[in-house]
Image: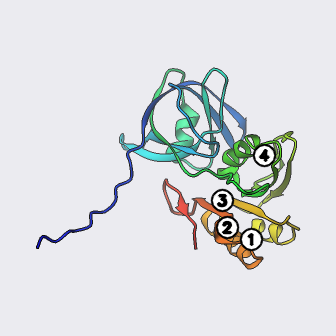
Amino acid sequence: MNKIIDQPRRRPELPTHELTVVDSFNLHTGMRRVLFDTAAFDYIPGQDLVLMLPLKDGTLGRRHYTIRHRTEQGRISIDFVMHGEGAGPRFARNAESGQKVQAKGPRGRSWLREGFTNYLICADETGLPAALHIAESKDQYQQIQLVLEVQNESWKVPVLDIGVSVDWIFRNDLPPGPNNLLRDHVARMTLPPSCMAIVMAETSNTRSVRHHLIERGFTKESIASEGYWRPGRIGGHDHVEE
């Protein structure tokens, strides 16, 4: 009898796109936006592209960045947090008009799930572009509460969408990294019934908020959580599901 051996499931290959830099500029000292031309493709707000960015040794490294916006002309913008000397900040700082970048994607989940009217979205600077784009794309009947942890008041941006409210948390002199700011703020909040939570921040902070929400009665299915970064990790996201 022939033995059937299960083969590991392979993820489908992501589509490849060529992005061409059109412009780049600072939103403020901590965030820089790069505008790209590219052939049209569909995506869901909150999804990211895997950018192939040059490293110091001349090779290319994979870096995940959320699509922040798409213009009526089809151009996309990506916002880069300008901390450190990694491939992302270095690329954004030196991006020149006409420069080509290969990207794969889009990838990621659909964040706004059917069956929910109220949403809580928690993010730090790395999740800020996704959080804002998701909030901007909501249906008229949906209500969104944003809780955004950033360094200081210079990061504040106007959010004028009806049905979206924002609580800003400022770290001030506290460096980015593991802390209890998001969790403690959410713990003080009165949340509506049948609320879905979306958490996108440093991995340990994301996990802390997730655990707190489960203690408050949220089901695992009503929480979507992603670790956008953690100290010592280069590139990629952490799926926080425990």
Residue at 22% x, 68% y: name it: 5
- Taking depth in this image into account, of 159 and 83 the one nearest to the observer is 159
Circle 4 sits on which residue? 155
State the image coordinates of residue 33 (x, y, percent, origin top left): 65, 34
Picture residue at 79% right of the left edge, 64% below the top:
194
Q: Position of residue 161 (x, y in %)?
A: 84, 40
Query: Within 10 angstroms of label 3, few (less than 14), some, or many (20 or more) residues?
Result: many
**Tag 2: Cα neighbours inside 10 Å, few (<14), some, or many (≥20)?**
many
Disc 2 element: helix
Q: Is residue 100 left or right of residue 199?
A: left
> Which numbered disc, 1 or 3, marks the residue closer to the eye?
3
In-front residue for pair 72/59: 72
Front label number (4 vs 3)? 3
Q: Is residue 114 above or below residue 68?
A: below
Q: Quadrant of residue 35?
A: top right
Query: Closer to the N terminus: mark 4 or mark 3?
Result: 4
For mark 3, what is the residue? 201
**Residue wearing tag 2:** 205
